[in-house]
Amino acid sequence: MPLSIDDKRAIVANVNEVARSAHSAIVAEYRGMTVADVTELRHKARSEDVYLRVVKNTLARRAVLNTDFECLQDTLVGPVFLAFSLNEPGAAARVISEFANDKLVVKSIALGGRLLSASDIEQVAKLPTFSEAISMLMSVMQAPISQLVRTLAEPHAKLVRTIAAVRDSKSS
């Protein structure tokens, strides 16, 4: 049964709203995937907060207009999934790369308004999660303070070691 014009408008509006708030997007062709594989992929995407949708290409092209993912329009050909990372830039790449094989082929990736090649999926998937990024930032911020404390404590520690060496040499 064909979609009515109102249904098409609703789909475009829904995907456009998601695209406006997403951090990254992936277009992946899914020829030959079984229903069980697709179900497992959708379940994994939901658990990772990735918006995964099969949309007609003409509707998808309209949906990504005036968003950071407008660069994906040329790759929207054939049966494709649109995967949007809602919270972390690498989430969609992690989910899709886990399922990528000869039946699920990555066509393109968009990150920060730039179109990346499909071979960059592993690099995008290795991007840190939000909590990992925060911990990395905190360790970078803490390093100068820790170094300062060690530097300030070193003269005292050196004095104590010198006195201990003198004591040991006199007792022998």
Image (cartoon, rainbow, N blue to C red):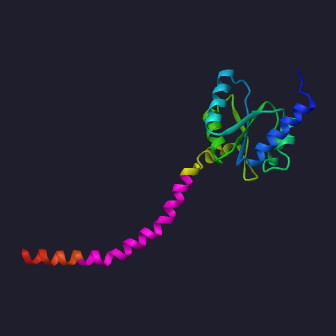
User: Can you give x and y, in whole percent of width and height, for residue 72 in the image?
Assistant: 80, 44
Q: Residue furthest left?
A: 172
User: Can you give x and y, in whole percent of width and height, for residue 167 in the image?
Assistant: 13, 77
* Residue 101 included in the magenta stretch of the image: no
* Side (left or right) of 155 relative to 120: left
**Residue 160 position by quadrant:** bottom left
* Side (left or right) of 25 relative to 144: right
Q: Is residue 143 shown above or below 109?
A: below
Q: Is residue 151 shown above or below 41?
A: below
Q: Residue at x 87, y 31 (%)?
A: 7
* Side (left or right) of 72 relative to 119: right
Q: Is residue 172 shown above or below 136?
A: below
**Residue 105 position by quadrant:** top right
Magenta span: predominant SS is helix
Q: Residue furthest right?
A: 5
Q: Residue at x 51, y 55 (%)?
A: 135
User: Can you give x and y, in whole percent of width and height, for residue 122 in the image?
Assistant: 61, 44
* Side (left or right) of 41 relative to 68: left
From the viewer's side, name the closer residue of 47 and 39: 47
Q: Is residue 6 shown above or below 161?
A: above
Q: Residue at x 73, y 53 (%)?
A: 112
Q: Which residues are magenta?
A: 132-159
* Residue 147 included in the magenta stretch of the image: yes
Q: Quadrant of the C terminus?
A: bottom left
Q: Residue at x 88, y 20 (%)?
A: 1
